[in-house]
Amino acid sequence: MTELVYSIASNVIDKIGTYAFQEICSAGGISEDMKKLKRTMSTIQAVLLDAEEKQVKNPGLIVWLGQLKDVFHDATDVLDEFECEALRRQVVKTYGNTWDQVRDSISYSALNLLGFGRKMSHKIKGIRESLEELEKDRARFNLEERSEDQNIVHREREMTHSFVPDSDVIGRVDDKQKIVDLLMHPGNNSNVSVIFIVGIGGLGKTTLAQWVYNDERIATNFDLRIWVCVSEDFSVLKLAKEILKSAGGGSSENMSMDLVQASLRSTLKEKRFFIVLDDVWSEDRNKWSRLKNLLIGGQGSKILVTTRSQKVASNMAPGPIHDLEGLPDEDCLSLFIKCAFNEGEHEQFPKLVEIGKQVVEKCKGVPLAVKTLGSLLYSKTEEHDWISIKDNEIWKLEQKENDILPALRLSYNKLPSYLKQCFAYCSLYPKDFRYNSRELIQCWMANGLLKKSNKSTEELEDIGEQYFKELLSRSFFQEVKIYDTISWSFKMHDLLHDLSLCVAQNDYFLIEDTKNTNNVEKARHVSILDHKWGVDATITFLHKLSNNMRTINFSFDDWGHYDNININESLVETCISRFKHLRLLNLRYSTLETLSSSISTLKHLRYLNLNRNKNIKKLPDSICDLQNLETLILRDCVDLEELPRDIRKMVSLRYFGITTKQTRLPANGIECMPSLRHLSFNSCHRLECFNEGIQRLTALRNLSFDNCKSLISLPQGMKHLTALEYLDITSCEKLKLMEGDDYPTRLRTLNIWGLPQLVSLPQWLKGSANTLQFLDISSCIYLGVLPEWLPDLSSLRELEIWNCPKLSSLPEGMDRLTALRELKIWHCPGLRRDYEREVSKDWGKMVEFSFY
């Protein structure tokens, strides 16, 4: 199967439409070439959704789509040349040029834009000719034009019904009781209450709903019970007819909406009904509202909805959500034995049962996965068959239409194209990895996966956060932990990781076992996580890869679990010399002592991670020629003596994490970087102050100082940072938060940790009274009082105070904090006593308190 072609084509067409391309194409005399290319691409794109769906039954389509994907990737590389050239010209115009820059720049005849245009015209013509040849082939596949809005996903599951034998349900007793209790509760004054069961595909939502539906308590409590399988087509007329028919009302195919609604309301009137809407996908709130307006019955009527999406639940109606979790291991094993053996037969094969326990572990509590693998082993009694299933990834096993992977794939198929690429990218991480949302978004950004229209004013980081939250709402991510307002951690269920490997094959490769490196020749994104390889073996492997690599990861930070990797200069030089289209290079935790000056030739590079390279002392000045670089991470490079002198030339840098031995940063450096959104100083033990001119960082949103032991004061001019929302100051022993008005006024989050010089909160915080939502004060051991104006922080939602032993009282008027929803007081004994004595009961009803 060849995936993601439509998504890649969309990205290429969007690039052609940007202002930067139009401007430089016009100047280079290649506007007409670009228009022809866009027309050809758009013609092919129109049939790609149909082609991707039909390839399952047509091997020829798989080949055709694979060829198209290669050409679209090549087109992306060519179009990125335009961005590189535009940025190079911008830097030359602003800061001048040197002979070295002119000599090293791949700008095709140096500053001669027409020469650049001729070279690019030749490449564009080659791509267009390849596409035109492939476009001729499409006629033999009988493909239909289809837009994404009109995309019809092939149904991959049967219609459900209301009955399940009790013997088919294993476990779920507690889940059933919770749902029954909610259904039996009389509810509020609302005519009908809605309850949701939410979880990933195959988890048993429908089975649980069936079991509840047939419970005797439910049968006796409701006048009518109605089961409707909704699935993909949320048609109000169709659903109303099905409900009417199940309720005993007359219904015919030709009935109008008006006749249906009148009959349905009459049938349900004053009857307490229980309706199950199984397998709801539609996020259209208007459709749901129109249907719900027809469902008016007796007091205590209930609707139970099963869905894979939290977003569906939140859009449909307010109501309790039961997040269905995986089955316990013991129940999974019972289900597996039932599927893999005839009744009682397992007692004859104790060794197979032991292997079966390991097979069940792969399923991570998902009943449909247990059934899938159990059914694959039914009637097989040879150990090698069982070991094969145990050792293979689920996505590599043969599956029937109603097995686990097709069930999960339906969730993937329902994703918009831009989310499909982001989900596929997650396959580069190992199973059970704890992702960091901010870092993942930076990687998506580096590979151009975040779509922003020409007219949009949204930041790319905000678009990435929307993507993350949308995947989260559709149950693709789980075990979310919120550590601060700009960074969440989460995991992906192993079966969804299998799905990501399935849809990402050929493009993305995760190498965890050096014995399994076949079929990587066409990969464009690779993670090499088997650290048993030596440098020579790794270099040999790199030579197997295509020159068109976009991503190379050598390590990940799994929240503290990492190994130092033996990456030397020759290995990095191999990456630089071979992979000129790299967008992302992750060298964290390596043992490099120097970074090659040839790094500047990776002009497409957007992301460079050198985190915790403890031996590196200096970066080459040529790194400043990476004018496309968006993320540069130098955190915990504890031996780094200084930053490069021309750092301001990195005009695209948005995220910059710094560790340096300098006492003072170079003038006209960081403060001249116009694109910075996130700036952090970590363990800069000698840094005493920040240069003047920080007010030039008008796009800066997040600023942090962590473990900067010599830092005396915050930068001057912070009141001009109108975009600054997040300020984090941690373990800065000499820092005094001085008074005055030269401080930010639109903060949303302020974290103050480990400041022994702090005796009271600074007055300047009042300037953010209308915007500050999160305030965290921790380990400020001499902080003796909270200011009387604290209740004036009218937008404050969360207040956390930890390990401030001298604090003995809360200010009067805390009940004026009407937006406050969470107050945590940890290890502040005097403050706890004051709260328990002084805080009003009415205020206490609104706020969640935690005391430790």
Image: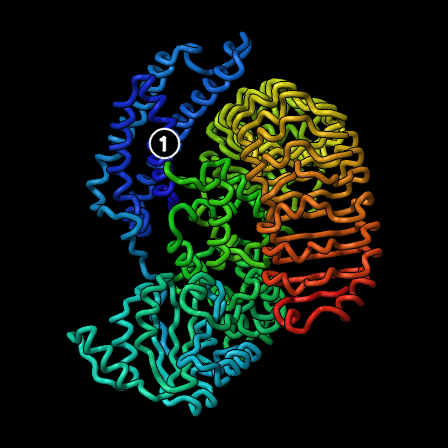
Residue 587 position, x and y percent, is 63, 33
Numbered marks: total:
1
User: Which residue is at a point 17% across and 74% down the rendered structure image?
Assistant: 256
User: Which residue is at a point 69% across and 54% down the rendered structure image?
Assistant: 789
Badge 1 crowding class, 10 Å Cα cut-off, few under 14, some 14 to 19, many 20 or more, is: some
Looking at the picture, which amino acid does disc 1 mark? Answer: Thr
Residue 844 position, x and y percent, is 66, 70
Residue at the top extreme of this rendering: 99
Left or right placement of residue 246 versus residue 465 in this view: left
User: Which residue is at a point 80% across and 49% down the rendered structure image?
Assistant: 780
SS at circle 1: loop
Quadrant position of the C terminus in the picture: bottom right
Instruction: Give residue 349's quadrant in the image.
Output: bottom right
User: Which residue is at a point 48% across and 58% down the rendered structure image?
Assistant: 473
Residue at the bottom extreme of this rendering: 220
Up-down relation of residue 549 to residue 186 (above or below):
above
Decide if residue 495 is in sight here.
yes
Residue 458 position, x and y percent, is 45, 42
User: Which is more toward the observer, 245 or 514?
Assistant: 245
Left or right placement of residue 115 versus residue 561 in this view: left
Residue 40 position, x and y percent, is 25, 32
